[in-house]
Amino acid sequence: MQSRLVELIAQLEQRLLRGEHLTLYGPRGGGKSSVLTQLLARFQCDAVPCAYSSSTDSLDDITRALERAYPGVETWAVRRRTARGRLWHAADRRAGVLLLDHFRCNGTGMVSFLRRLHGKIAGVLTAADIDTEVEHRRMRPWRYGALSVRMPSATDRQLRRLLDDQWSAARLPALAADARDAFVEAAYGRPGWITKCTELARERRYWCVYGPLITVLCIDTEVAVRYRALSMIREER
C-alpha cells in the first residue's frame, strides 16, 4: 500500500509542477487527505509556494489558501475582489500550488476563478469525496478545467496489515480472525476507515467481556468517516 501511495504522490507532484489542474476523487476515508498533506510537505521542502485548505466550499476558502501560499501580498486592508487580483498577479510572477481538500464547487464564482488560475498557478489539486454513483455523476471537474484522478483502493491484504499494525500500536487486545475479517470487509478498501476504527476502539464503550462490539464499532466508524466534514474545525476561519 505504501509503495502505491508513494508512486501516486510522485505522479501528482510532477503533474502539478507541469501546471495541471486535477481532481483526486474517491470514497471518504480512502486516504485523499493524507496524499494532500504529504504533497504539501514536499512542496514546502522544495520552497514551492503552496497552501492546503482542509475544507473548500467557497471562493473565500480558495482566497485564504492563496494568502497562505503568498504571505507577502498585502490583502488584509482591501476588498476580497481586490485581494484576489493581487494574489493572481503574485502567482503570475511566481507559480505555486494549491491543494484544496473536501472540495465542493458552489457557484460560478469558484468556477470562473479556478479557470482564471490556469497558466498562473503551477497546479491545483482538488480532493472530492465520492461514495455513490449519484455523487460521481454530479462531479464535473471539467467545468473548472480539471482532469480527474481516481484514488486507488487498498487491497484486503494491505488493510489487514494496517489493522494489525495500528491495533498493536494502540495496545488493544488481540483480535479474533472473524473480527479482523469483519473490519476489513466493512472498510471497502479505505485505509482511513481502519484508522478511524482503531481510534474509536480505544474507547471502553465498544468492548464487552467477549471482545469488541463489532457491529456497533463498524456502524459508528462509518458514521464518523462519512460525516467527519460536518464536525470539522475550520482552521482557516
Image (cartoon, grey):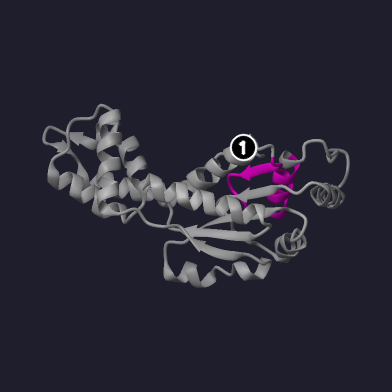
156 left or right of 88 in image: left
Quadrant of res 211: top left
Q: Position of residue 217 (x, y in %)?
A: 27, 44
* Bounds of the magenta segment: 48-67
Drawn side of residue 152 relative to residue 115, left or right: left
Q: Extreme left residue here?
A: 210
Whether residue 75 is situated above or below residue 187 in the rendered picture: above
Along the viewing direction, whichever of 84 and 39 lies nearer the viewer: 39
Q: Position of residue 164 (x, y in %)?
A: 24, 38
Q: Could one spot residue 74 in this view of the protein?
A: yes
Q: Position of residue 227 (x, y in %)?
A: 45, 50
Q: Is residue 207 above or below residue 181?
A: above
Count the marks: 1
Horizontal arrangement in the rendering, residue 18 relative to residue 217 (left or right): right
23 or 215, which is in the foreground? Answer: 23
Q: Amino acid at mark 1?
A: Glu
State the residue at coordinates (79%, 49%): 91
31 within the magenta span: no
Q: Within the image, what quadrant is residue 146 found in?
A: bottom right
Q: Quadrant of the C terminus?
A: top right
Magenta-span inclusion, residue 52:
yes
At 77% from the left and 62% from the top, the residue drawn is 116
- At which x and y percent is residue 170? 29, 29
Residue at 67% across, 67% down: 145
- Residue 57 visible in the current orientation: no
- Dividing the picture into quadrants, the one containing residue 188 is bottom left
Q: Which residue is mark 1?
A: 235
